[in-house]
Every structure is written in C-alpha cells, then in structure tokens.
Image (tube, rainbow, N blue to C red):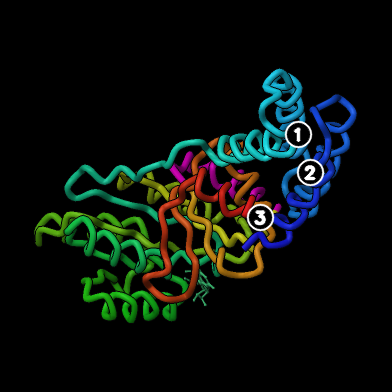
Amino acid sequence: MFDNLSERLERSFKILKGEGKITEINVAETLKDVRKALLDADVNYKVAKTFTDTVKEKAIGQNVLTAVKPSQLMVKIVHDELTQLMGGETAEIDINARPAVILMSGLQGSGKTTFSGKLARMLKAKKNRKPLLVACDVYRPAAIEQLRVLAEQIEVPMYCELDSKNPVEIAQHAILEAKAKGYDLVIVDTAGRLAVDEQMMNEIAAIKEAINPNEILFVVDSMTGQDAVNTAKEFNERLDFNGVVLTKLDGDTRGGAALSIRSVVNKPIKFVGTGEKLDAIDQFHPARMADRILG
Ligand code: GDP
C-alpha cells in the first residue's frame, strides 16, 4: 500500500540530510519534491498545494529548534500534517440507537455488499450486536444472492423481497422486521450503478428520507484515485453522508483517494477494506496511516 509514495517521500527528505538547518531554499527544494510525489500518487492538486504550503510555513517557523536535525524535523511536520489531512482523530460510527440503521451508498463494484457483510460480522463479534442485513437492489438478482451468501457465512439473518420493485418499502419493512424480531442493527445495502446517475441518486435519497438512518456510509474503491474523490463529492451533495469507507487498500493503491477525500469532501474516512475476505476490515486511524506512509 502506498509503496511508491513512501519511497518518494523518503527520497525527498534526503535533500535535507547533511543540512545544518532549515532554510527557505532547502525547504522549498524538499517540498517541491514532496508535492510531485503527492501529485504522482494522484492527490488532488489543490490539496497537495495547500499541504506543502502549510508544511513550509511550519518548517520555517520551527527553525529555532536547532537541536533537531532538519530532516527529522521535516519528517515530523509532514507526519503531523498528513495526519491532519486525513482527519486527525479516528472517527467512530454512531450506532447507539436500537435498532441502529446504517445505509450503504456507492457505485457498483465499489465493495458495498462485501463491506456490509464485513461490518455486520465485526459488530456482531466485537459489540455483541444482532445485525439484520437488507438487500435493496431491485435490479440485479445476483446482488441479492451475493448478500444472502455473505449473510449465511457470517450467520446473520438477511431481509429481501424478491417480488418487490420498491427499495424504499423494502428498507422500511426491514426496519419493522428488525423491531419485531429484536435485531438491534440494520445494515441496508443499496443498488449501485457503474456511474453516478440521476435515478440512482433519487432512489437512495428517497431511502434516506424514508428510513432516516443513523449512519450513511459512502463506499469507494481506493484504486480509482481522483475519480473516487469526485464520486464522493457527488454522493455527498445529495446524501450528506456521515463517513467514507475506502476499499481495496490491499491492492496497488497510490494513495490519492485516502489523502484527498477528507479535505475535499470534509467527511471522515471511518473504515478501510483490506481484502476480499470478511475479516479484512479495519477502523481508519489517520495517525497510523501517516506512520505507514512514512514507513
Ligand atoms: P458492490 O457492487 O459495491 O456491492 O461491490 P462488491 O461488494 O460486490 O465488491 C466488488 C468486488 O470487489 C468483489 O469481487 C469483492 O470481492 C471485491 N472487494 C470488495 N472489497 C474489497 C477489498 O477491500 N479488497 C479487495 N482486494 N477486494 C475487495
């Protein structure tokens, strides 16, 4: 994950090795390199520029701390700023209500259904919750089947209405079913399209309106870089979601989505998906991610 970015940043800091102190000139040179590394990792242009401007200001401001070597000081400042860029603190999901209702949104193939299964499994095991998985895709029977298979694997009940063409009603009925049967966590998986379209947006907005979820998560494939950020913006404008799930971080991801989404959309990344298996889910910790990026 982010191997290329890590290597490039490490090389940028080498510019400062052997320098006695931080100067406008050697900082500018280092940060030009850092900015290039970020852009090559598909970080949003404005985000990369603001990032290096902030680091520059801090580095020059902290120049007085002569006890610390310039390269070490730069690594620390970059680490802190990367952490801030990714949201600073770890963002929790709000599932205090019983039942708590979580609505999944995102494009087809982003990993929504897989993540629904992962989250149900995790909250069942770690928080002792009783999840109900809900299939709201009325267009693709294969999607319903996929959720059914996942639900069986993790031994969680699954709600669907094979004859219905009304996802709003399915979601509403599922919540009634959860209340009647004592399930305290409802995870609603919705239909996705290959690109953002008006019908999909209207449909998921109507589901949101009808069920008033405690959490709306936007699931996105981290491999798609800037596209991930643009899609996040479009979904956020319609749904005002609570958090982002970045999937496929186990792949050859360059890092752009992880580093840009928070500041472009102003919503935290809450979870990451790190594999196809159902235990490949982690809470997102900005500082730990910065550690990994800087190696
Ligand atoms: P949906 O259309 O949004 O519901 O997406 P799916 O859950 O069906 O996932 C699409 C594909 O991505 C499937 O082949 C999943 O196994 C795969 N997938 C989902 N999450 C991850 C992940 O974190 N890492 C990897 N490598 N593959 C994933």
Which residues lie in the magenta part? 226-243
Residue sitting at x 68%, y 33% = 73
Residues at discs 2 and 1 in contact (Cβ within 8 Å) = yes
Q: Which residue is mark 1?
A: 52
Main SS type for the magenta part?
Answer: helix
Q: Which mark is residue 205?
A: none
Q: Amino acid at mark 1?
A: Thr
Number of other residues with Cα within 10 Å of mark 1, as a class: few under 14, some 14 to 19, many 20 or more? many
Q: Which residue is mark 2?
A: 34
What SS does tag 3 mark?
loop
Q: Quadrant of residue 18?
A: top right
10 Å crowding of disc 3: few (<14), some (14-19), many (20+): many
Height in image: 243 above or below 65? below
Residue 112 as seen in the image, left or right of residue 15: left
Mark drawn on residue 255: 3
- Of the 4 image quadrants, the one containing the N terminus is bottom right
